[in-house]
Amino acid sequence: MYRITVFPGDGIGPEVTDQVIKLIRKIGQAHHLVFEIQQSLLGGASIDKHGVPMTPEALRLALESDAVFLGAVGGPKWDRVEPAKRPEKALLELRKSLEVFANIRPVLLMPELVSRSPLKAEIVEGCDFVILRELTGGIYFGTPRGTEGSGPSERAFNTMVYTAAEVERIVRKAFELARRRRRHVTSVDKANVLEVSRLWRKTATAVHAEFPDVTLDHRYIDDCAMQVIKNPGQFDVIVTGNLFGDILSDECAMLTGSIGMLPSASVGGKYALYEPVHGSAPDIAGKNMANPLASILSIAMMMETSFELHEIAREIEQAVRDVLRAGHRTADIAEPGQRCVSCSEIGDLVCGRIGK
Ligand code: IPM
Ligand code: MN
């Protein structure tokens, strides 16, 4: 039996999560596996009901399950909530509590979607790399942080900080990941300016000595932001800090046609958290038009990484490919003028191909 906690969250989160629940049930039926799914509120939905973005009960559920799925959190409705109680705070706390320091974001372009990328086909064709984003440290969590004073002298500050141990463990994961791929790691930093990046680079170089079969190069974040759209084929595994990884992954989503296609898995030790890379997309929420494929592909990552159900992971990926190959498209990946399928329809189409 596999216990999965599901947090639909806010905006399009509940719609894409519905497709995930449907998919997990279908996998259970088709393959005679028992998945126990428990649901709880997180983010704005939890603020509305309980006054806090994550209750201790919600966190306990997550800590007691074998894997956690999260739809999306946040939205304009909670923009004026005090910082300590914002929806995003729940997500950051959840990541920290689950100790999922390694966020794996595959940037894989499905051949059917080449024409949907805003970049030229000859640039994006065959694009297949992974962003490994450090997820529980860096400027997202560094202290001191805060605001003080008022008027023109009002100040706000954050701290970008990494310890050598934090860099070492994420960089080691990058080399291990590269060993299962094309054996090349690009470490991304801003070592020409930041001390924290100099430590990052020094540590990455030191860890590299243990992986002589993997090549390592270093790039500055600004250069890397350019290279990923100039020549994405040069990358295999990109490893970087929390903030740089956040920005790069949205940029790289454009290589795959839509941010609606990007899944993620966050791992550390004991726990794992699966989330689509996209946010809550309040502008299209409740319209049944979101693309659930990033969430569905995140479940493929869950089957693979948390449960070692490799064949099922491949089956989900294949089902997604087949649905795209058959020409079905949600609005974000549709050709101009094409009839779009809804979020729930594309979810049904994927589920219909499971167990065949
Ligand atoms: C992401 C998101 C989150 C982040 C937000 C919602 C806090 O943008 O997962 O990329 O910045 O990590
Ligand atoms: Mn982001």
Image (cartoon, rainbow, N blue to C red):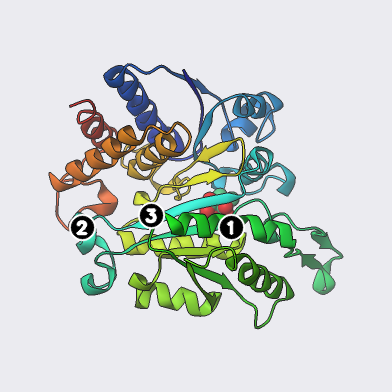
Mark 2 vs 1, N-terminal side? 2
Label 2 is placed on what type of residue? Pro
- Would you say residue 74 is visible in this rendering? no
Query: Is disc 1 surrounded by few (<14), some (14 to 19) or many (20+) residues within 10 Å?
Result: some
Dot label at residue 111: 2
Secondary structure under tag 3 reads helix
Residue where numbered disc 3 is placed: 259
- Label 3 C-beta lies within 8 Å of the nearest ligand 2 atom: no
The residue at the point 65 percent across, 42 percent down is 99
- Kindly report the distance in space between the C-alpha atoms of the residues bearing marks 1 and 3: 27 Å
- Kindly report the distance in space between the C-alpha atoms of the residues bearing marks 2 and 1: 31 Å
Dot label at residue 172: 1
Q: Nearer the viewer, residue 117 or 239?
A: 239
**Mark 2 or mark 1: which is in front?**
1
Query: Is disc 3 surrounded by few (<14), some (14 to 19) or many (20+) residues within 10 Å?
Result: many
Across and down, in percent, residue 289 comes to: 31, 41
The residue at the point 37 percent across, 38 percent down is 300
Secondary structure under tag 2 reads helix
